[in-house]
């Protein structure tokens, strides 16, 4: 199960949860792969998929048991936490690197700073990924809550039939 399938959670809910367990360096590997293979359009597509997942959950388009959703929600939370940690590491890119007080050094420093902070940077990809993870978590929570509500409603209706 790849990162792109993360926004399609309902198809492989239970079997894929363990595959996403963070192991410290896994997130950096994901970001490296994203930086090489996912441009602005791919990240936007992933975001649209997460939006559709939320819309589907809101409209009752899918429901999932709490037992199936909780492990995936936990993994999503772990990744969101990893992003917070990475964000502190990326603070090094808030300032231009000191490459000398000559024209060439200043120009290279400006270029490096711009590249580290533009819409195709790792930082931008990280921000987009965090949004997708949060939206996926929200969709699973909604779908799980709806499943629980439907189950309680069915139990109540069954009890009312019995007297």
Image (cartoon, grey):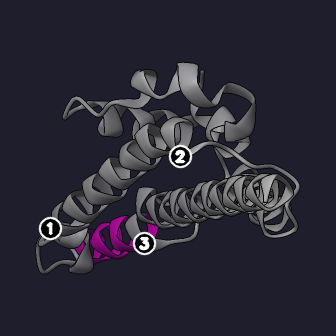
The residue that label 1 is drawn on is: 99
CB atoms of marks 3 and 1 within 8 Å: no
Q: Is residue 124 above or below residue 32?
A: below
Query: Would you say residue 31 sits in the magenta stretch?
Result: no
CB atoms of marks 1 and 2 within 8 Å: no
The residue that label 2 is drawn on is: 66
3 vs 2, front mark: 2
Label 3 vs 1, first from the N-terminus: 1
Identified at 51% across, 71% down, the residue is: 118
Identified at 19% across, 35% down, the residue is: 24
Measuring from the top left, give residue 105's x and y in whole percent.
23, 70
What's drawn in magenta, residue-wise? 103-115
* Position of residue 153 in the picture relative to residue 21 (left or right): right
Q: Secondary structure at mark 2?
A: helix
Measuring from the top left, give residue 55's x and y in whole percent.
83, 67
Quadrant of the rendering where the N terminus is positioned? top right
Q: Nearer the viewer, residue 126 or 51?
A: 51
Label 3 vs 2, first from the N-terminus: 2
Q: Nearer the viewer, residue 122 or 133?
A: 133
Identified at 61% across, 42% down, the residue is: 65
Measuring from the top left, give residue 156's x and y in whole percent.
72, 61
Q: Secondary structure at mark 1?
A: loop
Quadrant of the rendering where the C terminus is positioned? bottom right
Label 1 vs 2, first from the N-terminus: 2
Q: Secondary structure at mark 3?
A: helix
* Position of residue 66 in the picture relative to residue 19 (left or right): right
Q: Is residue 70 above or below residue 77?
A: above
* Position of residue 124 in the picture relative to residue 101 (left or right): right
Q: Nearer the viewer, residue 36 or 98?
A: 36
1 vs 2, front mark: 2
């Amino acid at each position: 199960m790849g990162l792109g399938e993360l926004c399609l959670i309902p198809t492989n809910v239970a079997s894929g949860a363990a595959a996403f367990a963070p192991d410290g360096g896994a997130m950096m590997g994901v970001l490296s792969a994203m930086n090489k293979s996912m441009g602005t359009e791919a990240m936007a597509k992933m975001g649209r998929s997460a939006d559709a997942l939320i819309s589907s959950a809101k409209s009752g388009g899918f429901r999932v048991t709490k037992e199936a959703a909780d492990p995936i929600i936990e993994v999503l939370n772990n990744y969101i936490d990893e992003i917070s940690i990475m964000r502190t590491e990326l603070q090094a890119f808030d300032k231009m690197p000191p490459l000398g007080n000559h024209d060439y050094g200043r120009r290279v420093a400006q270029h490096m700073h711009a590249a580290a902070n533009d819409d195709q940077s790792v930082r931008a990809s990280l921000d987009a990924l965090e949004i997708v993870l949060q939206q996926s978590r929200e969709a699973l929570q909604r779908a799980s809550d709806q499943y629980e509500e439907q189950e309680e409603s069915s139990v109540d209706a069954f009890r009312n039939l019995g007297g």
